[in-house]
Image (spheres, helix red, strand yellow):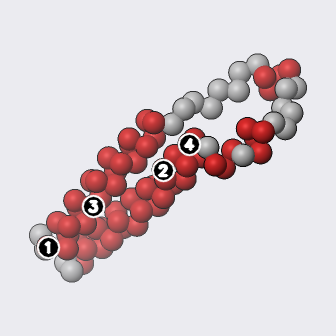
């Protein structure tokens, strides 16, 4: 195994563990009976939702997922082609 493959393997594992931790830190998406009652009024929370911790965790999870996919593909190409 080349040095590049070892480095990519370590990065892949670190990103995977980070993605799992970020996923577990997120809260559930429980709307409950509020959807059936029609209580979907615009509130301050819904307007500033992009600035909350939940949205930041979702964004970081998405970034980790995309980087995990890219690193995994690079790792596959490295091991398959012998770079």
- Label 1 residue SS: helix
For marks 3 and 4, the one nearer the N-term is 3
Q: Residue 21: horizontal and vertical position, in percent? A: 38, 41
- CA gap between label 4 and label 1 equals 38 Å
Residue 22, percent from left and from top: 43, 43
Q: Nearer the viewer, residue 31 or 51?
A: 51
Q: Residues within 10 Å of mark 1 (few under 14, many from 20)?
A: few
Contact check, label 2 and label 1, Cβ < 8 Å:
no
Q: Residue at x 48, y 50 (%)?
A: 61
Mark 2 or mark 1: which comes first in sequence? 1
> Quick one: 82 or 46, which is closer to the camera?
46
Element assignment for label 4? helix
The residues tagged by marks 3 and 1 sit, at their Cα atoms, a distance apart of: 12 Å
Secondary structure found at label 2: helix
Closer to the chain start, of discs 2 and 3, is 3
Point out which mark residue 53 bears.
Answer: 4
Q: Is residue 16 left or right of residue 78?
A: right
Task: Say if 39 sits above or below 11 in the image.
Answer: above
Q: Secondary structure at mark 3?
A: helix
At a point 34% along the width and 63% down the height, the residue shown is 72
Q: Quadrant of the N terminus?
A: bottom left
**Marks 3 and 4: which is nearer the front?**
4
Q: Residues within 10 Å of mark 3 (few under 14, many from 20)?
A: some
Mark 2 sits on what residue? 61
Residue linked to disc 1: 3
Task: Report the residue at 35% width, 65% height from top.
Answer: 71
Give me the C-alpha separation between circle 4 and circle 2: 12 Å
Q: CA distance from mark 2 to mark 1?
A: 28 Å
Where does residue 65 sit, x and y in percent of width and height? 45, 55
Q: Which residue is mark 3?
A: 11
Quick check: can you spot residue 26? yes
């Amino acid at each position: 195994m080349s040095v590049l493959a070892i480095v990519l393997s370590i990065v892949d594992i670190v990103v995977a563990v980070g993605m799992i931790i970020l996923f577990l830190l997120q809260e559930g998406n429980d709307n409950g009976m509020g959807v059936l009652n029609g209580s979907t009024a615009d509130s301050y929370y819904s307007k500033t939702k992009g600035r909350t911790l939940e949205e930041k965790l979702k964004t970081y999870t998405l970034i980790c997922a995309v980087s995990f996919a890219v690193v995994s593909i690079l790792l596959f190409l490295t091991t398959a082609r012998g770079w």
